[in-house]
């Protein structure tokens, strides 16, 4: 296995692991800042003092988190001030990351197969070909096995 392929495998395993863990970590209704504050018993004035900012800035940060507009940098600073740490990840919506890769490889393979079949039909050479679905699956598997990354283009 090539170094590039090994690194890709490791990255896939890490993303899949994060995806599995994230299922139990849905964002709380009030957001993580407010939830963590509640869990440790720290009020907004105490948090503001630790950060050297006003209470209103803490309330704004909580609202920004709920709205999805807070920066990772700000979340990290707030987490550290409360004795926590920020953890974030990009994970697949559903299933393992390999399914995303295979779906894209199938899309690329389908385009290649359809183009090839069209040329063969024009030359009257399409007699006896396997089904398009079989050909797409085989070509997609070959694309992945070869470690090609051009299918994202």
Image (cartoon, grey):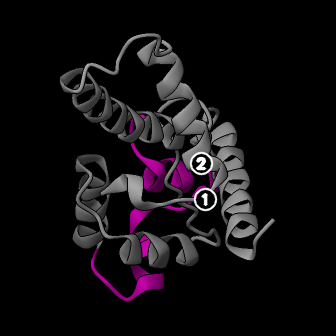
Q: Is any part of residue 111 visible from this angle? A: yes
Q: Residue placed farthest to the bottom in the image?
A: 52
Q: Give SS at disc 1.
A: loop
Q: Residues within 10 Å of mark 1 (few under 14, many from 20)?
A: some
Left or right placement of residue 118 versus residue 130 in this view? left
| Image x and y of residue 114, in percent | 29, 28
User: What is the quadrant of the C terminus in the image?
Assistant: bottom left
- Proximity of marks 2 and 1: CB atoms separated by less than 8 Å: yes
| Image x and y of residue 121, in percent | 24, 21
Above or below for 106 versus 38:
above
Q: Residue placed farthest to the left in the image?
A: 122
Q: Residues within 10 Å of mark 2 (few under 14, many from 20)?
A: some
Identify the residue shown where x is 76% and y is 71%: 2
Q: State the residue position of label 2.
A: 144
Identify the residue shown where x is 37% and y is 41%: 108
User: 123 or 56, which lies in front?
Assistant: 123
Identify the residue shown where x is 34% and y is 39%: 112
| Image x and y of residue 3, in percent | 75, 75
- Looking at the rendering, the stretch of residues picked out in magenta corresponds to 28-54
Q: State the residue position of label 1.
A: 147
Q: Give SS at disc 2.
A: helix
| Image x and y of residue 133, in percent | 46, 16
Q: CA distance from mark 2 to mark 1?
A: 5 Å
Left or right placement of residue 102 versus residue 107 in this view? right
Residue 11 lies within the magenta run: no
User: 86 or 81, which lies in front?
Assistant: 86
Identify the residue shown where x is 41% and y is 37%: 109
Left or right placement of residue 99 versus residue 83 in this view? left
């Amino acid at each position: 296995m090539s170094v590039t392929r090994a690194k890709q495998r490791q990255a896939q395993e890490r993303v899949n692991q994060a995806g599995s863990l994230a299922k139990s970590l849905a964002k709380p209704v009030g957001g993580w800042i407010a939830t963590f504050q509640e869990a440790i018993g720290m009020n907004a004035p105490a948090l503001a003092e630790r950060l050297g900012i006003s209470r209103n800035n803490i309330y704004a940060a909580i609202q920004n988190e709920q709205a999805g507009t807070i920066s990772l940098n700000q979340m990290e600073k707030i987490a550290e001030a409360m004795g926590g740490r920020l953890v974030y990840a990009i994970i697949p919506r559903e299933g393992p990351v390999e399914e995303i890769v295979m779906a894209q490889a199938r899309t690329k393979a389908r385009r290649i197969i359809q183009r090839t079949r069209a040329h063969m039909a024009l030359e009257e050479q399409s007699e006896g070909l396997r089904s398009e679905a079989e050909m797409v699956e085989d070509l997609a598997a070959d694309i992945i096995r070869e470690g090609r990354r051009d299918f994202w283009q």
